[in-house]
Structure formats: structure tokens, C-alpha cells
Amino acid sequence: MIAELGHFALILAFGVALIQALVPLIGAARGWAGWMAVGEPAASAQFLLIAASFGALTYAFVTSDFSLQLVWANSHTDKPLLYKISGVWGNHEGSMLLWVLILALFGAAAAWFGGALPPSLRARVLSVQAMIGASFLGFILFTSNPFTRLAQPPFNGQDLNPLLQDPGLAFHPPFLYLGYVGLSMAFSFAVAALIEGRVDAAWARWVRPWTLAAWVFLTIGIALGSWWAYYELGWGGFWFWDPVENASFMPWLLAAALLHSAIVVEKREALKSWTILLAIMAFGFSLIGTFIVRSGVITSVHSFASDPERGVYILAILGVFVGGALTLYAARAGAMQAKGVFSMVSRESALVMNNVLLAVAALVVFVGTIWPLVAEMFWDRKLSVGAPFFEKAFTPFMIALAIILPIGAVMPWKRGSIIKASQPLWGALVLALAVVALVWAVGTDRSAVALVGAGLGSWLVFGALAELWLRAAHRPARLLRLPRADWGKATAHAGLGVTFIGIALLTAWDMEDIRVAQVGEPFTVRGYEITLDKVEQIEGPNYLSTTATMTLREGGVVTAVLHPEKRVYPVQAMPTTEAAIDYRFTRDVYLVIGDAQDGGGWAVRTYIKPFANWIWAGCMMMALGGLLSLSDRRYRVAAGARRSAAPLAATPAE
Amino acid sequence: MLKRLILAVVLLASPVLAVQPDEVLPDPVLESRARELAKVLRCPVCQGENIDESNASISRDLRLLVRDRLLAGDSDGEVLDYVVGRYGEYVLFEPDRSGANLILWLVGPGVLLVALGGAAVFIRSRRPTDGPTEPALSDDERARLAEILRE
């Protein structure tokens, strides 16, 4: 019964979305205030209906209602509650439902908090948002209904893929979708602005927080996924350049570019048409990502729904929205008159360089991802494009970006001089070179990756600190009074540097040891003494585990007792490795237990992973920087200023 | 039920680790070359895994093949040619730089050059024209400004 109500709510939401797509758009074109006002309640209603539908599906999962085909295929009564809930989006149909739920949430948020927008712009934004919503609701209802019943409900379900039964992966998809779908707001604003034929600083001020929020979520989602791969897949890799990873990385790169170009629109009223194009492309790449994951045209570790019919439907959505938006862009971009003038050496030019590097880097990732498909179609060559290609073709862009970033960040608007603007950065440069020297001295292998990566990473970190010091006019007391946006910018840029350092030092210095370990006989890997104490068979809630107890000693002192596991999930008939990791500031010790060997003893893999944590710590700093920026006063002021009830809330500018 | 579980464990517990201890070559230099080669070779039956990470038995065969060729004195390039000759270019994670693949390799640098050129033209077009674009202050405004500055 509840499942049917959920299905019914979904159908109603589809109807509401169609109304929301048409009525406000016509209202805005004719100037009918009443029709325009329909958008707001419709957006709320659409969100509530989809939330009810999502709630019904969650209820079915939590109560293990195996008469639903989806629950039967992805759940089991023995599964812990957390994974019963995360199982809702651990499959194609449920994840699409989460997708539209978040889409409707963003639409509703624009309705709730967009009171200060010009009514026609708001009506058009809500209408475009509802068009996207309606097409995906239609996709769910016609090709991927999550509420399909089974005629004869089985006694128990088939369980969730064991790899997905993990806290990191439980929250990876929701964050990723918040990011993907958040970019739909930038898209809707871009299309609405094209219809209006007007882009100004106020528009950019509206688009930027949405893009920033989407980018923050995307950063967290990607970092969670990468961290999960690191500890779960059993060999400590953190990025594989897999098509599905690339699918999330391309929108991230473009969203980063969009954030920066929107600053130029907001502050200087230049780069307008390019910003609109970026907004369209960023969401376009989110849709391409959805297509890649769900059509199965490009084989990947992640693709969980390979169905050509669904692929064609998503391709049609992609074609209509991106094609339509680009056509509109071609017709209207001329109306975007740029105002601001600036010289060759200026903050504006530096941000143009940022955009060039990020956009071309995204293009390289895109071409590399689809190249196997292209090569097979046109030249009948079956080939692969993997990590070695991306490392060679993509990395130079990031190096160039890191070199110019701190200089661009301190460059004045309009007109500057590189020599003069870089003055405050000399200290940062000296410190970065000192770090290079340190890495040279500490490293035994003179690895270029370590030297370049650590040098550039520290250049970014010290550059961000130098910029804060400059903005505070060299007075410590002023540091805390700086706008949050300044802190956000410095934190995010320093976070990028920390991630650089982590990736470079991990790649250059990681070490692996494979051996047969006898119980009770210690062995040494790079100064760490490791003993396999015992191996036990343990029964978990829905799996069987071979758990080892291993002691890690440094200089004779016990630093950690670790329990690497090997699990078997009988229902899915699938083994997983659960590595045990001793996390420290400058290194991880990563242990994996393998099979019992014929001659006695166990296969054991030991990895020393220097600076691994820095990769994700840097990502979290980037996300935190985004949040700090998002909480900056001027957004609250912009939101509050036009609410006539609270004019006193705005404090006078210093 | 328990019997079935134990059976399942026995049947499934085997291939969890990728590289097995018995594969490792005694010569550390050759072994590290073998590991590097294993990272650029794709497992032919898996989805996007290299043979170093893969648990499939064909990946084990390939790893052993790579080590045999290294022991026979092949250079890295000869080993790759040998494997590609048998399994096709599909197993190479880094596509060669011949024929149509040149497009793949050149798209990054090529588009970067075009984009830089475009950006340069655009930035030049935004250059302030000679002389101030805003009209100079009128006498009244100048007087008012002087007044403000005096305060």
C-alpha cells in the first residue's frame, strides 16, 4: 500500500513538474504576474511529493518488503540498518529517485530563498528547473520504476553488493548527486538569463553561491569516493582514471572554472557570455556523467545499470537540454555586452588563464574517456585509455595552474605589474624552495615527482598564507576581521596545495611488500617491524570473516595492533578485503591479509603510504574554503537587503 | 545453513590478493620492472583494472608471462610488443602515438594553444583605450572632492 502511494506521489510530481515548466514560462513571456507566481508553490509541491515517494521507498527498504522487486534485488533481512537505508540509492532506480529528489530540493530552495530575484527571472529559473525535473521523472516512470511489485514475494532478498556495504560509500552518492544536480541551478540561471537577454553583476551574485555549493558537495563526494577506494579495494590506490570517476571529475573542473569566471562577471561585468557557456557545459557534463554511468557504453568498474534503452533516453535528455541551451546561446550571446576593461596584466587576465587551463584539462579528460568509443566507431580499433595516458596528458595543466595561482590571487583588478604584485610572495617562494630542498635531502631516490609536487604544493600553501598576510596589511589583529570570502579563498587554495603534496609524496615514496608471513615470526618493512599474531574465523551480521591480528612496532615499541580482514558475503557469493590501516600524520601503514599458503603461513601485503591522509585533508580544506566563502556576509546581505522587513540587519560597511 | 556457508567460504576464499608471493622474482630490479609493466597492461576480462590489481586468472597468466619475458632478457618495450602481439592493443592502457591516436595525444596541447590565442585576442580587446573612458570631473565635482578631502 505504502509503495503504491509512493508510486502515485511520483506520478503527481511528474504532473506538477509539467505545470511548473509551462505556466511560469508563459507568465514571464506575457508579463502575467499570477502565472509567474505559480512557480513557487509548484516547486514546493513537487519537492514534497518526491520526498513522500522517496520516503515510501525507504520505508520498503527498512521494513524489508521483498514484494518490491527493487528491495528484493538489493536488500536482505540480515543487513545492518545503515545499509538498508543506503541500499535505497545503491541501485539504478533508487539512485535516480534520489537524483530527482535533490533536483526538486534545489528548485524548491530557489523558490523559498529567491524572493529577492526579479519575478520574471525567478519564474524562468523555476520553469527550466522543472523541465529538467519532468524529463527525469518521466525517465523514472517509463523506464526505471522503483515501485514494481513481484507477483510472488520471495522469502528473503539478494543483498546489496558487499563493496557498497561501507560507511564511506553510503554517503558518497548523496554528496555526488548534490554536486551534479546543484549544477542544474547554474544551468537554469544561465538559460533564464539567455531568455531574458540580460546578464549583470546581480545575476552573477545569484549564480555564484549555487555553483559554490554544488562544487563543495562535488568535492566532498569525490573525496569520499576516493578515500573509500583507498581503504576498501585492498591495494591503496586512490584514483584510477576510470570512466565513472572521470564523469564526476569533469563537472568538478568546469564548476571550478565557473566559480572563478562568475567572480569576473560579479566584480567587473566582463566574461559574461563565456560564463553562461561554462554554466551550460558544467551541467551538460553532469548529464554526460549520468549517461556514461547508466548506459554502459563505456565499460567501467562502477557502471551498475547497463541498459541500452535507458542510455538512449538519457542521451535524448542530454541532446534536448544541452543542444537547446547551446542554440539559445548562439542566438542570444551577442546581447551580453561586456563592460569592464582591463589590461593584459591584471586579475581578470589571471582568471582567464585559470579558465583556459581548467577547461582544456576537462576537455583532455573528456577526450581520453570517450576515445575508446571513438576509435572503435571510426577506425575499428579496440583500445584502452587508462591512468598512464591521463597522468601524462593531464598533469601538465595542473602544474601550470599551480605555478600561476598564487600570483593571480594577489594581482590587482584592472591593471597591475607582475613584479610589483608578486612582491609579497617572495617569502612564499623561498619557503617553497626550502621544502624542495628538504624533500631532496630526505628522499633517497631523487624523485622528480616528489620534488615538483611538494614544491608546487608548498608554493600554493605559503602563497595562500602570504595573501592573507597581505590582505590583513601585515597586522595580526586584522586577520580575524578579514571577510570570510578572503579566508575561504586562502583555505581552498591552500587545500589544493595540501592535496598536491599528498599525491606527489605518496606516488613517489610509497612502498609495497608481498610475502608469506608465519604466525609469530616478525618481519621488517622499511623500519617497521610487523608480526602476524593470529588468524581467526569470525561470523559477522551478514558475512564470514577471516580476521588477522597483527602488531606493528617501531623501534621495539608497539605503535598499533591492526586487524586486516578477508570477508565473504554468502548471499552475494562475493569476497571482499578489509585492509587495516594505521593512520598517522606523515604516513599510513596499510596491511592486507591474503590466503593461507600450502606450506603454512599466510600471504600478507604491507604498504607504507607516506602522506596519504594529506590528499583527503586537502580536499576537505577545499570544501571548507567553499563553505567559508558561502557564509560570507555579502551573500547574507544580498539576500536580506531586499527584504524590506529587515533593513536594519545590514551593518554599515567599514 | 552453516554447511552451505562453510562450503561457500571454501569455494570463494581463494582469489582475493592480486599479486601472489610465489610470483615475485628474486631479482628486485627485474621485479620492480615487472610491477611497472603490470601497471600499464589492462586485464583483458575485467572492467578497467590493470593486471597488477586484478584477481582474474588471466591476469596472473599475463603477470607470469611478463616475468618470463623479462627473465629471457627482453627490454620493457619488447615485453609490451610481445604482449600486444598476442592480445591486441586493447591491453595497453597507454595508447600508442600512431595514426588516429595522434588526435588523442595532441588534443590537449593543440586546444591549449588555440585557447591561449583566443584568450590573448580577447584580453587585448578589453584593453583600456587611450585616455580615460570616464569623462573627467567637472569643476563642481572637483570642488566637492576637495571639500571632502579636507574634512
Image (cartoon, rainbow, N blue to C red):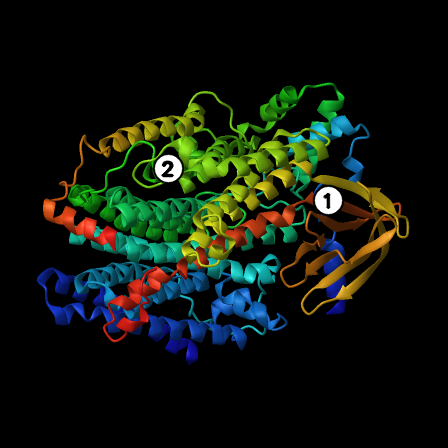
Q: Are marks 2 and 1 on the same chain?
A: yes
Earlier residue among tags 2 and 1: 2
Could you tell me if residue A12 is visible in this image?
no
Q: Residue at x 37, y 35 (%)?
A: A353
Subunit under mark 2: A
* Side (left or right) of A594 relative to A615: right
Q: CA distance from mark 2 to mark 1?
A: 41 Å
**Numbered disc 1: secondary structure:** strand
Q: Is residue A78 above or below residue A492?
A: below
Judged from the image, the secondary structure of the residue bearing numbered disc 2 is helix
Q: Amino acid at mark 1?
A: Tyr
Residue B19 image position (x, y, % from top left): 72, 40
Q: Which is in the foreground here, disc 2 or disc 1?
A: 2
Q: Please give the residue where the numbered disc 1 appears in the rendered image.
A: A607
| Image quarter hosting the C terminus of chain A | bottom left
- Compared to A239, does A131 lie above or below? below
List the single residue furthest toward the front. B150
- Relative height, residue A17 to residue A400 (above, below): below
Tell me the kind of residue under disc 2. Answer: Ala
Chain to which the residue tagged by mark 1 belongs: A
Residue occupied by mark 2: A350
| Quadrant where the image shows the N terminus of chain A | bottom left
* Coordinates of residue A214 in the picture (x, y in percent): 40, 56
- Residue at image position (76%, 56%) is B10
